[in-house]
Image (spheres, rainbow, N blue to C red):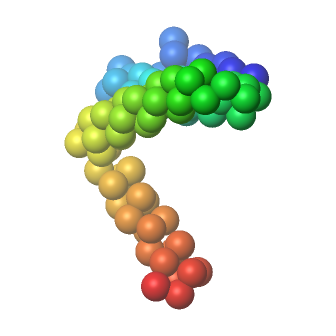
Amino acid sequence: MLSNIPVDLKKVKKEDLDKELLRLGMIAELDAVNLYEQLASFTDRKDIKDLFLDIAKEEKTHIGEFQAMLLRDDKEQVVELEKGKKEVNEMIGK
């Protein structure tokens, strides 16, 4: 269920290491969001469901923190993210 590190960090160029670490942090947080939302869907107890969903929401904040740092350090990622937004907006007619 949880992701493995998709890259051998020993083989990453030193100048790219921090960007890869930030991406790995994002992967870990996405895994956590998926886990907590799935766990919430399995319970009928509102208090437990609310707890899992609240924690999932916090993990989404963490994703935003990692992304903000990554976008500061990886200008190519900024450009490609904007391209992706544009493509989606064209696809949905905005």
Q: Where's residue 92, x and y in %?
A: 57, 81
Picture coordinates of residue 77 (x, y %)?
38, 50
Residue drawn where x is 73% and y is 29% of the image: 44
Q: Residue at x 48, y 65 (%)?
A: 84
Q: Is residue 19 visible?
A: no
Task: Report the number of numbered marks.
Answer: 0
Q: In the figure, residue 36 lies in which quadrant?
A: top right
Q: Position of residue 9 (x, y in %)?
A: 51, 16
19 or 32, nearer to the observer: 32
Percent position of residue 56, x then y:
51, 30
Q: Is residue 91 above or below residue 53?
A: below
Q: Quadrant of the N terminus?
A: top right
Quadrant hosting residue 85: bottom left
**Which residue is outermost to the bottom?**
93
Q: Is residue 69 left or right of residue 85?
A: left
User: In the drawing, does residue 90 fall left or right of residue 18?
Assistant: right
Q: Is residue 1 left or right of residue 71?
A: right
In the picture as drawn, the residue positioned furthest to the top comes out as 10
Residue drawn at x 48%, y 78% is: 89
Specify whether residue 4 is in view.
yes
Q: Is residue 4 left or right of residue 11?
A: right
